[in-house]
Amino acid sequence: MNNTRVQRDTQRLAGDDEGVTTAAAILRAGGLVAFPTETVYGLGADATDFRAVAAIYAAKGRPRFNPLIAHCAGIDAARREGMFDAPALALARAFWPGPLTLVVPASPGCGVCDLARAGLDSVALRVPDHPLARDLITRVGRPVAAPSANRSGHVSPTTPEHVLSDLDGRIDAVIAAGPTRVGVESTIVACLGGAPRLLRAGGAPRALIEAAIGRNLVDETSTSEAAPLAPGRLAAHYAPNARVRLDAQVIRPGEAALLFGPSPPAGIEDAAAVLNLSVAGDVTEAAANLFAALRALDATGARVIATSPIPETGLGEAIRDRLRRAAADR
Ligand code: TXA
Ligand code: MG
């Protein structure tokens, strides 16, 4: 198939054996399939096929070639692609399958193509904790490159409907399997010799990672986006159309309100729209609801989304990071 074309008929596949079999065949032939992981929906392509990977960038409308995460079926498959030092191995054993991505030196036999690695000599690897994702990757028999399945600059999709609203007609298929469990992208840790470094906060909480390696992570989550290591961490990567106002104690008339916790803030009665990420004040529940809520409030046409303060604990760090990026000037 001609993988650089953008217009395609997008098949809706069921999240069953037949759907996964069809999806695997499309991926093996160089096509693009969006599939659920436990974090967000990914836009998959055969990571060993540079034409298929190029088609990911075309479908997303990515302005430049950022390195992608190669998804593997298990730890053994991942260790064929990258070289794991002691902390990397400890983290893989503690968190995989799960919402942690490890950036490690590419192995001499690494099959993940140069384009998926953006020419770097490292590779980002992850074993997702979702039965359909692992089944799919196993059947493809190769690592599957997958960024989040959204148009460049939009928030990540946590439902098949989000995927289709961004990419219908631009990808070959989507496996429709309901909302994702975690709701924010994986945590990214670089293990490239020396102290492991936190590149992106995400679905695996920092405290658990630090406990698994017995030391603190070097925090590189706010390093300038000009840093070549993780160009995907653009400041305004998670941007809705509305302006996002952080840590709002008071809602101003006409603002859309994104709340957290049981007590409504002052001014709520004059809000244009109101959603609560977690009435119980649970950051894990809030993470699962975050991107759908941002999309829904954005769709109201409100010019400003005012967000309640969210604690920094557990998945709160990832939520705060995404909201900060959504609030960054474009
Ligand atoms: O949860 C997730 O991680 C989702 C699901 C689909 O697995 N995927 C995802 O991919 O969020 P994406 O492409 O949106 O983010 C990948 C991040 C980017 O910030 C990129 O810069 C970084 O991983 N990355 C990839 N390879 C890297 C490398 N060799 N060195 C440093 N950063 C890398
Ligand atoms: Mg993304």
Image (cartoon, helix red, strand yellow):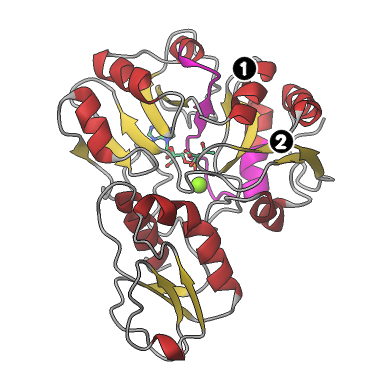
- Marks 2 and 1, Cα distance to the nearest angstrom? 14 Å
Where is residue 187 shown, x and y percent of the image?
A: 37, 38
Write down the region rendered in magenta: 55-75
Query: Does any portion of residue 172 appear in the rendered image?
Result: no
Q: Quadrant of the N terminus?
A: top right
Instruction: State yes or no: residue 256 in magenta.
Output: no
Task: Give the amino acid at mark 1.
Answer: Arg
Mark 1 crowd level (few <14, some 14–19, many ≥20, 10 Å Cα): many
Q: Which residue is drawn at 57% across and 50% down?
A: 158
Q: Is the CB of the residue bearing disc 1 within 8 angstroms of ligand 1?
A: no
Quadrant position of residue 146: top right
Q: Which residue is drawn at 23% across and 20% down?
A: 193
Task: Give the amino acid at mark 2.
Answer: Leu
The image quadrant where one finds ligand 1 is top left
Q: How many labels does the image show?
A: 2
Q: In this view, does 291 lie to the left or right of 51?
A: left
Q: Quadrant of the C terminus?
A: bottom left
Question: Residue 32: which numbered mark, if any?
Answer: 2
Q: In this view, does 58 lie above or below 306?
A: above
Residue closer to the observer: 116 or 248: 248
